Image (cartoon, rainbow, N blue to C red):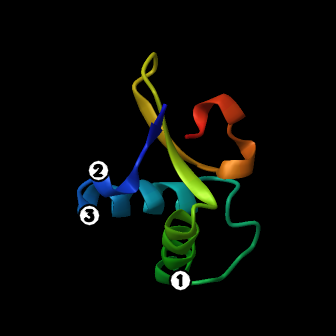
Amino acid sequence: MLIPQQLLEVDTLTRLIEDFVTRDGTDNGDETPLETRVLRVRRALDKGEAVIVFDPESEQCQLAMKRDVPRDWLP
C-alpha cells in the first residue's frame, strides 16, 4: 500500500527519510552531508520518483523508487 507523503507529519517524514539515508549499505562511501541526502529524497518524493510503501502485515513503512513498486500498487 502506498502512503501519500502529505499524510505524514513533517517530523515523521523527516525521520523516515533519515532512517532510509543512514541505513547500512546506503552510503557506499558517500561523504555527502545528511541534510543533502535528506533533501535529495524529499525532491524524489516531490517529483513522484520515490514513494512511501506501507506493509500492513509487518506494519513497516519504507521508501522505494517508483520504478521498483509493482504497477498494480500505483494509482
Most distant residue in the top direction: 57
Q: Nearer the viewer, residue 67 or 12?
A: 67
Q: For the residues marked 2 and 3, what is the alpha-carbon distance in whole angstroms?
A: 9 Å
Residue behind mark 2: 7
Identified by mark 2, the residue type is Leu
Residue behind mark 1: 36
Viewport quadrant of the C terminus: top right
| Residue 27 picture quarter | bottom right
Q: Measured from the top left, where is residue 71 in percent x and y?
A: 70, 35
Marks 1 and 3, the one that precedes in the sequence? 3
Quick one: label 1, few (<14), some, or many (20+) residues within 10 Å? few
Identified by mark 1, the residue type is Thr
> Is 41 placed above or below 36 here?
above
Q: Which residue shows up at 67% across the image and 52% down it?
A: 65
Do callouts 1 and 3 mark residues in contact (Cβ within 8 Å)?
no
Residue behind mark 3: 10
Quick one: label 3, few (<14), some, or many (20+) residues within 10 Å? few
